[in-house]
């Protein structure tokens, strides 16, 4: 069995407390994003993830619903030389940690 490299991760709480130069990048689909997302996250669906569309950042903290899609995104980003971390457990873990989820209009959101 091949040895797969470990995907670098961070926790939802660490992602929420991000420091300057860190960007929270949500790679879920538009309907998932519209239902609710982390405050101040930037939306870029996984299928549109391309270097010329990435926000300028020192480090990308990548999140999806469960951590699967964001893990694939982080593997590709790291392989391309980016400093990126997967938010372990995704938005499901984010909401389980009691962190805020909002819609674009500022109302409380939900994870779908």
Image (tube, grey):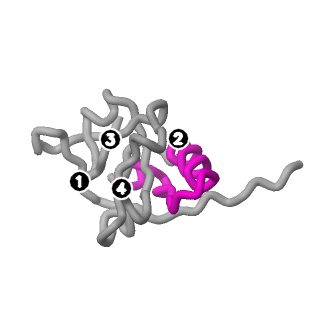
- From the viewer's side, name the closer residue of 89 and 41: 41
In the image, is residue 67 above or below residue 45?
below
Q: Earlier in the sequence, mark 4 or mark 1?
A: 1
Residue 55 falls within the magenta-colored stretch: no
- Give the spatial CA distance, label 2 vs label 3: 14 Å
Q: Position of residue 3 (x, y in %)?
A: 82, 55
Spatial distance from mark 4 to mark 3, Cα to Cα? 14 Å
Q: Which residue is mark 3?
A: 43
Q: Which numbered disc, 4 or 3, marks the residue closer to the eye?
A: 4
In this picture, which residue range is highlighted in magenta? 69-94
Identify the residue at horizontal 43%, vertical 58% (top origin).
Answer: 60
Residue where numbered disc 4 is placed = 56
Question: Where is mark 2, residue-wise?
Answer: 69
Single out the mark in the foreground, 4 or 1.
4
Q: Main secondary structure of the magenta part?
A: helix
Q: Which mark is residue 40?
A: 1
List x then y, in percent, for residue 76. Answer: 60, 47
Q: CA distance from mark 2 to mark 4?
A: 21 Å
Residue at x 29%, y 59% (from the top left corner): 98
């Amino acid at each position: 069995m091949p040895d797969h490299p470990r995907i670098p991760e961070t926790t939802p709480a660490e992602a929420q407390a991000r420091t300057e130069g860190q960007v929270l990048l949500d790679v879920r689909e538009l309907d998932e994003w519209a239902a609710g997302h982390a405050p101040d996250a930037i939306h870029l669906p996984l299928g549109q993830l391309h270097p010329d569309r990435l926000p300028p950042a020192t480090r990308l903290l990548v999140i999806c619903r469960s951590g699967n899609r964001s893990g694939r995104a982080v593997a590709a980003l790291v392989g391309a030389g980016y400093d990126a971390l997967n938010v372990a457990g995704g938005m499901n873990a984010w909401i389980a940690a009691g962190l805020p989820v909002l819609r674009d209009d500022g109302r409380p959101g939900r994870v779908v």
